Image (spheres, helix red, strand yellow):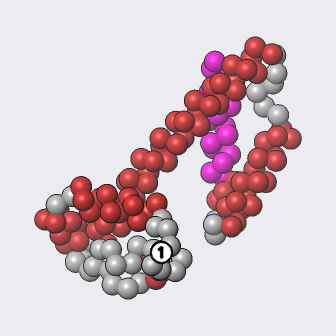
Amino acid sequence: MKFRQSGEPQSRSYDIVKECLNEYSIDYLASVVDVLGGVPLAEDDKMNGLAYMSIAAAYLLIPKLDEEMVHLLAERMDVCKEIGRFKKERGLPIFVPEREAEVLRTKVELGKRRGFSPEFTTNLFQIIMDGSKEEQKRV
């Protein structure tokens, strides 16, 4: 990712890091930098848009992103429960192999566009879909 040029939209990561920087005191950020070896980032384009931020802010970003992922997965599971109710009411099967294969194909393609290996994306979404099927069986 290139540095954001004037007028370009900011990434969601930028917003979260900014939130972290506003939320935590300078002393706390300094203590995180000390724990990490005291090396703040300079202009390093390899950090995918996190350049000009300290390594402390980058480390604070990870838990925030993890929290967002958990919330998104919870929302996904809520939708899966609704789908499970619909299927149960109509006597439809929970598992449809052709549908799952198609979903995996589309997710692998999406993952490739973001630089993920097909194996990573397949494994990730297989776990998510297995959890979704379990949720649908419980309704």
- Residue 126 lies within the magenta run: yes
At label 1, counting other C-alpha atoms closer than 10 Å, the crowd grade (few under 14, some 14-19, many 20 or more) is few
Instruction: Report the span colored magenta.
Output: 123-139
Outermost residue to the top? 89
Residue at 76% x, 27% y is: 94
Residue 112 image position (x, y, % from top left):
70, 66
Residue 31 in view:
no
Can you say which quadrant of the picture contains the C terminus? top right
Nearest the viewer among 26 and 134 is 26
Is residue 18 rendered to the left or right of residue 27? right
Task: Name which quarter of the figure residue 54 lies in.
Answer: bottom left
Residue where numbered disc 1 is placed? 7
Q: For the residue marked with disc 1, what is the amino acid? A: Gly
Q: Is residue 10 above or below residue 78?
A: below
Q: Is residue 128 above or below residue 56?
A: above
- Residue 63 lies within the magenta run: no
Magenta stretch: helix, strand or loop mostly: helix
Outermost residue to the right? 98
Task: Name which quarter of the figure residue 19 lies in.
Answer: bottom left
Task: Name which quarter of the figure residue 90 lies in.
Answer: top right
Residue 9 image position (x, y, % from top left):
49, 68
Nearest the viewer among 1 and 98 is 1
Residue 35 image position (x, y, % from top left):
22, 69
